[in-house]
């Protein structure tokens, strides 16, 4: 399913009228993005407010680039329809029975440069994908995660276990 930001508004109250189809999204922007408001991509019709303002508590991050918009981390509804999805480069990827290795089936990354930069950034100490992404200009944690998993398959990195899952180090 495609993801696109339909509009930017200054008031949360202005967002609802602009949402028509599942996945439609409006950004509430007051001197910076505050909220991402979207119609649930599962089709249940619910509006999902996603906080983008760290000053207001736990927040998601919106990444905008010429390749498209991405949101990190995943959006997981713990009420109503219980949908769980990620937004990556203007696509909404719903999680399903394939578990958490969905990206392994995606086409190979064409950005060999990003793979090299991720490998250079990894150290002997485990790092989160967020920390790795923060060190690489214009990278998105989802792409960093794909690179880290690819490096693990090549025997150049390893992923932590248990509470360290999602943290990587160089071998």
Image (cartoon, rainbow, N blue to C red):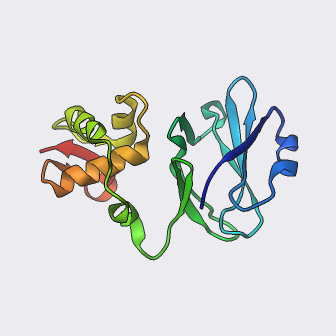
Residue 55: image quadrant is top right
- Is 78 in front, or is 23? 23
At 30% across and 59% down in the image, what residue appears? 162
Q: Is residue 41 above or below residue 15?
A: below
In this picture, residue 40 sits left or right of residue 70: right
Q: Residue furthest bottom?
A: 97
Q: Is residue 165 above or below residue 125?
A: below
In this picture, residue 142 sits left or right of residue 57: left
Q: Is residue 57 above or below residue 90?
A: above
Q: Residue furthest top?
A: 31
In this picture, residue 57 sits left or right of residue 15: left
In the rendered image, is residue 37 in sight? yes
Q: Position of residue 36 (x, y in %)?
A: 69, 44
At 35% across and 28% down in the image, what residue appears? 135
At 27% across and 36% down in the image, what residue appears? 113
Which image quarter holds the N terminus? Answer: bottom right
Q: Position of residue 152 (x, y in %)?
A: 20, 53
Which image quarter holds the C terminus? Answer: top left
At 32% across and 46% down in the image, what residue appears? 110
Residue 97: image quadrant is bottom left
Q: Position of residue 70 (x, y in %)?
A: 53, 44
In the rendered image, is residue 159 in sight? no
Residue 99: image quadrant is bottom left
């Amino acid at each position: 399913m495609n993801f696109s930001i339909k509009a930017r508004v200054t008031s949360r109250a202005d967002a609802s009228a602009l949402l028509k189809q599942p996945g439609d999204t409006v950004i509430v922007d007051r001197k910076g993005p505050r909220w991402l408001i979207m119609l649930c991509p599962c089709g249940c019709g619910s509006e999902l407010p996603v906080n983008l303002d760290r000053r207001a508590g736990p927040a998601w991050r919106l990444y905008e680039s010429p390749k498209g918009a991405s949101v990190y981390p995943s959006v997981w509804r713990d009420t109503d329809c219980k949908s769980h999805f990620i937004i990556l480069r203007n696509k909404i990827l719903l999680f399903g029975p394939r578990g958490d290795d969905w990206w392994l089936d995606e086409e190979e990354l064409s950005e060999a440069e990003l793979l090299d930069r991720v490998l250079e950034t990894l150290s002997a100490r485990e790092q989160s994908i967020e920390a790795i992404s923060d060190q690489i200009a214009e990278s998105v944690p989802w792409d960093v995660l794909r690179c880290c998993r690819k490096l693990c398959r090549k025997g150049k990195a390893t992923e932590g276990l248990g509470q360290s899952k999602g943290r990587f180090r160089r071998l």
